[in-house]
Image (cartoon, grey):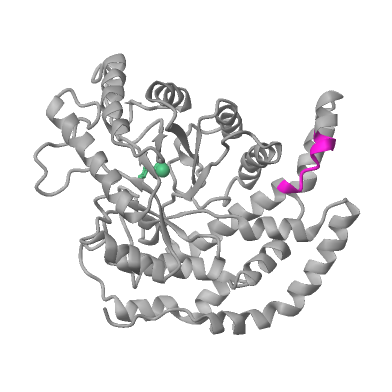
Amino acid sequence: MATHFEIDDNFIAEQNKKAKAWVEEDYEHLGKQLSRRGRDIEGLTAKAQAFRVAVPSWGVGTGGTRFARFPGVGEPRGIFEKLEDCATINKLVRTTPGVSLHIPWDRPEDADTLVEFARARGLHFDAMNSNTFQDQAGQPHSYKYGSLTHPDAAVRRQAVEHNVECIELGQKLGSKAHTVWVGDGGNFAGQQHFRRALALYLDSMRDIYAALPSDWRLFIEHKFYEPAFYSTVINDWGVSYHCARELGPQAFCLVDLGHHAPNVNIEMIVARLIQFGKLAGFHFNDSKYGDDDLDAGSIKPFQLFLIFNELVDAELEGVENFAPAYMLDQSHNVTDPVESLMSSAVELSRAYVQAHLVDREALKAAQTNCDPLMALSTLKQAFTTDVSPILAVAREREGGAIDPVAAYRASGYRQRKAEERPAQMGAAASGIV
Ligand code: RM4
Ligand code: MN
Ligand code: MN
């Protein structure tokens, strides 16, 4: 492969010089402010440096709606170019070395070559994702009326085999988890027998579970609507929890923030799953109406903070086997996906550090003393603290950019990619992500 443009570490260091003076000043000021509150800024910066969230391979292409897709210039045309973009994101923010692959969109011709390519760019492979919500060319059976829950055993078998293939490929890639999201459901009342469909789902999932290596985890992803608009088989966290329990200790429940009805208390679902030892992790995004249509933290930052408040609470309490997997899963329709993913990764770090700022003693006291106002104020004190200097210093210490979007724009990366990657009609996997 010809040498492709990459953002150079020295370029990042040069860009950082521009911001250094104010960052140091703001960091020092925040450090003083936090020490008045009995908090050590260095400990928080170390937390920010250690934070990780995986990037979805499908997120670096422009998404779309069922109405249209407006492709950007220089879009990645295959898995290697997608990895180039993922590496760029990680280079600038330094929290995203994991990449989650969607099969068959990203099925490599040779797993070893892909591993080598990723490793050379400081990347590794996070959870695998199967796809039984679309038909692929040459596939014997259609998923139009379902996959793992289809009434025809041959269709279910094909869907199971595809999932097993994802696990086998993932083993070659160094992945340790497999995520199953199905589009199965009904568009008409009566179309699907609710109990029978769930029983078929469990049968199919048992076969997939059986193919799981002993050190792997199986993630069940629920979603309350779309592509089926009347009912879905794994519609909410309760059904997901039931299935995870039925399947066994390696099965867990994944929370995609966009997969809930408006106003649902997602942070409470998170707390429940932690308490029951079944939280798999997250697909982070934000949404006002639909699924993964907005960038993480872009419209409900307080909700994101409250979710992290539960996560950090469990982390500090040392809850047994607490190891949630973090991933972004969002569709970028009007922005450069690299910029959106970097910004979202930063928002997650922000919520994580802010959650570490919560005065847990004060919160507990407010709860014990039945003082709701003080409980909220305690949370708000953390949420309204601008931790940007901590995030900037953490990135810089890891070799990343103080201002990732500014550095990215200054590098001319997208323009260079537009030259390297002339548009190919129909090259992008789809517009539905
Ligand atoms: C779904 C779900 C899955 C993702 C697909 C592309 O809504 O979030 O995680 O794989 O979209
Ligand atoms: Mn998802
Ligand atoms: Mn989704």
Q: Which residues are magenta?
A: 356-363
Q: Residue furthest right?
A: 36
- Left/right of residue 364 with respect to residue 36 in the rendered view: left
The quarter holding residue 366 reads top right
The image quadrant of residue 68 is bottom left
Q: How many marks?
A: 0
For residue 301, above or below residue 152: below
Q: Which residue is farthest front? A: 214
Quarter of the N terminus within the rendering: bottom left
Q: Is residue 395 covered in magenta? A: no
x then y, percent, for residue 33: 86, 58
The main secondary structure of the magenta stretch is helix
- Residue 391 placement, left or right of 102: right
Viewer-proximal residue among 16 and 288: 16
Which residue is rendered at x = 67% and y = 82% of the image?
18
Q: Is residue 359 magenta?
A: yes
Of the pair 137 and 114, the residue shown nearer to us: 114
Judge whether residue 11 can be spotted in this image. yes
Q: Residue at x 56, y 66 (%)?
A: 93
Residue at (46, 81) in percent of width and height: 412
Image position of 268 (left or right of 43): left
Say which residue appears at 31% left-offset and 35% top-offset: 182
Q: Position of residue 230 (x, y in %)?
A: 33, 26
- Look at the picture and state if 180 lies above or below 396: above
* Side of 253 where 428 appears, left or right: left
Quadrant for ligand 2?
top left
Q: Position of residue 233 (x, y in %)?
A: 33, 25
Visible in this render: residue 185? no
